[in-house]
Amino acid sequence: MVAANHFSHLDPVIVSLAVGRPIRYLAVDELYGNSWFFDWLTLWLGAIPMTRTGVALSALRLAIDELESGGTVGLYPEGVRVWNWGEVEPKAGAAWLAHRVGVPLLPVAVVGSDQAMGRGTKVIRRRLIHITVCEPIDPGSYDGTARPHQQMMEEWGRRIDAAVSAQYQKLAL
């Protein structure tokens, strides 16, 4: 189960390349309907459309099936592309899926994709993008705790924050 921070439409491709395997992303259904090419491409790449309103049972079943069969599912816990890291409280869906299936939660930090194609732009610019694949979080370590999913996401946030901060420090030098 891959969980990355989210700045750009480029993030799914970037994160898949960094992880080194295809990832089936959970993608909110509001992304669809604006471009037939985008709709076709994301579905062809294996995106799992899910509703932002209500409970996305069919999407969750597909994600669980994918994880149980040895595949990789990706999710952006922030739920939206953000302007700045930390502006949105992450949701616990990635931790819930990882814990439910018993697979590691892999934090991936992306820095610079917002400069290449951030929110509000449709133009891709050539910019450096830095990716850090963090140590996986073992969901079994949280068995028996009061709030396992929230605690896993707090750890996810710490790892992403450390990686994003380290990348920004390198860029400032």
Image (cartoon, rainbow, N blue to C red):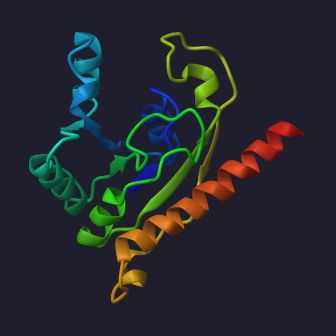
Locate residue 135, reporting x and y percent: 56, 65
Residue lying farthest to the bottom in this orientation: 144
| Lateral position of residue 80 relative to residue 37, left or right | right
| Lateral position of residue 58 relative to residue 91, left or right | left
Residues 151 and 2: in front is 151
Residues 54 and 138: in front is 54
Locate residue 141, reporting x and y percent: 43, 83
Residues 85 and 101: in front is 85
Identify the residue at horizontal 21%, vertical 31% (top origin): 29
| Lateral position of residue 19 relative to residue 98, left or right | right
Give the total of numbered labels: 0
Identify the residue at horizontal 46%, vertical 59% (top origin): 106
Q: Quadrant of the C terminus?
A: top right
Locate residue 16: give its quadrant.
top left
Locate residue 67, reporting x and y percent: 25, 58
Locate residue 126: give its quadrant.
top right
